[in-house]
Amino acid sequence: MQLRNSSSRYGLISIVLHWGVALAVFGLFGLGLWMVGLDYYSSWRHTAPELHKSIGLTVLALMLLRVLWRFVSPPPPAPATHDAFTRFAAKAGHMLLYVGLFGVLIAGYLISTAEGAGIPVFGLFEVPALVSGLPDQADIAGAIHFYLAWGLVIFAGLHGLAALKHHFIDRDATLVRMLGRKA
Ligand code: HEM
């Protein structure tokens, strides 16, 4: 499969970034909900948040790469079968997913850096705290992170359902071309 996007399908780089980030987002959401309920004596009490932060920062790096890649290799135009409304809805929806993703990730970063400490990533290196000490930083970033994460996961679920509708009801190429097959 080609690495770059073409006029009829997504290439390997976009496909791996799309499905990798999607998997990580649903995983991070589940991990986040589970870890906040852990009791004081759980052996996961420290490990789970460390894992959540490490994966979150990895996703942030992948998202920066993804935005860069869109300039290097733009996504294919909408399938010819999409009408004007579908094209607009898809564009707006994808844009919202990008904004939501960056919002959740940046808010998560700001929760962790509120006290001025850097964030270790899988124990390999540390991402420095570039922003800290803002008034109520952890609380405000925490609320944004929580509500945006819910919004993002619900919206991503609707986005997935829309893709399945295109595949099974409209029987067009929307889903297959994100699976590496030609439109
Ligand atoms: C957290 C989960 C998800 C996120 C954040 C997400 C995000 C995105 C974004 C931003 C795009 C625009 C193309 C790009 O820039 O890569 C896209 C395209 C696409 N996504 Fe997702 N997605 C998610 C989950 C899913 C799921 C579960 C499915 C299918 C069941 C799916 C199917 C598709 C398809 C088929 C396209 C191509 C649409 C087109 O060409 O118009 N996505 N997704």
Image (cartoon, grey):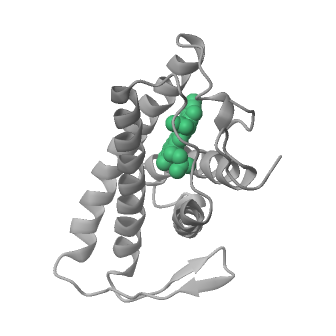
The percent coordinates of residue 52 (x first, y second) are 54, 61
Residue in the foreground of this view, choosing between 74 and 38: 74
The percent coordinates of residue 156 (x first, y second) are 44, 38
Q: Residue furthest top?
A: 169
Q: How many marks?
A: 0
Q: Is residue 120 left or right of residue 107?
A: right
Vertical comparison of 5 with 108: above or below? above
Vertical comparison of 118 with 60: above or below? below
Q: In which quadrant will I find the C terminus?
A: top right
| Residue at 55 percent of width and 30 percent of height | 79
Q: Is residue 158 left or right of residue 52?
A: left
| Residue at 57 percent of width and 55 percent of height | 74
| Residue at 25 percent of width and 58 percent of height | 143
Asked if residue 30 can be seen in this view, the reply is no
Q: Residue furthest right?
A: 1
Asked if residue 26 can be seen in this view, the reply is yes
Where on the picture, by quarter, is residue 157?
Answer: top left
The percent coordinates of residue 111 (x first, y second) are 35, 72
Residue in the foreground of this view, choosing between 98 and 71: 71
Vertical comparison of 115 with 17: above or below? below
